[in-house]
Image (tube, helix red, strand yellow):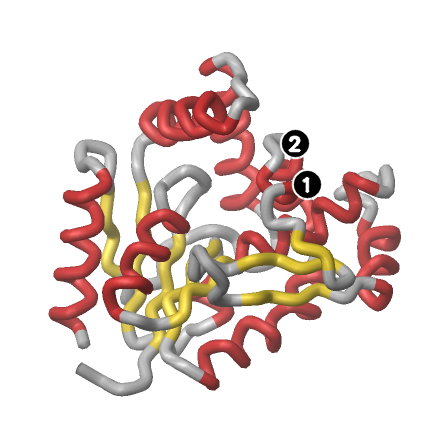
Amino acid sequence: MKEHYAIAIDGPSGAGKSTLAKAIAAELKITYVDTGAIYRTIGYVAWQRGIAPEDEAAVLSLLPQLEIGIAHGGEDGLQHMLLDGEDITDQIRLPQISMYASAVSAIPGVRDYLLETQRTFARRQSVIMDGRDIGTVVLPDADIKIYLTALPEIRAQRRFLELEQRGTPKPFEEVLAEIIERDYNDMHRDVAPLRAAEDAVVIDTSELDFEQSRELLLKTIEERL
């Protein structure tokens, strides 16, 4: 196996990218980078300050003021997002932040601002990075590209159960509507729309449980390395 490599995982919301990427990173002992959490951090600040996430000028004006940090390790060994030195990992997972993250990530200036930050991680160490445009834009030369997907209804059911477990339940129909809206927004934005890279391996987890998905991803990665 190569000593230094990059794995790009793209796919729609609720496909299991983050959960699976964390598990694979632990298995391979490499760094997991959740790029969605970075966009969620910016969305969180916009939400906190009452700024409409589609207000490009207002969102861009926030960026120079923000001190965004990423910490790996700690007791859980996972990625934690820091804002002005404060750990906001839990806050950015609030349900209302998802749509904010989707909207701010469609702003070209935001993507440009964060692009080099993400690439620096891959230059310094072996990484598994997930998001919407990792294999197509952020790491176009990644050693392995995977497009992870599942039917909208399946992804909505997973999200529905996750929200229940977190103590922030929502009606299933509302969760499904949000998934469908997020898919449309991510796939139709002008900058770096969500799509599978031409050389990506497409994996549909609709009929797979977590362990089956993990084993399939690990097998796919090991074969290509």
Residue 38 versus residue 88: which sits nearer the camera? 88
Q: Is residue 180 something that shows in the picture?
A: no
**Element type at marker 1?**
helix
Badge 2: residue crowd in 10 Å (few <14, some 14–19, many ≥20): few
Residue 168 versus residue 184: which sits nearer the camera? 168
Report the amino acid beneath label 2.
Gln
C-alpha span from label 1 to label 2: 7 Å
Q: Residue furthest front?
A: 75
- Kindly check if marks 1 and 2 are in contact, taking CB atoms under 8 A apart as contact: yes
Q: Name the image quarter holding residue 145.
A: bottom left
State the residue at coordinates (30%, 71%). Answer: 29
Residue 120 versus residue 134: which sits nearer the camera? 120
State the residue at coordinates (32%, 64%). Answer: 25
Disc assigned to residue 96: 2
- Residue 159 drawn at (x, y percent): 43, 29
Disc assigned to residue 100: 1
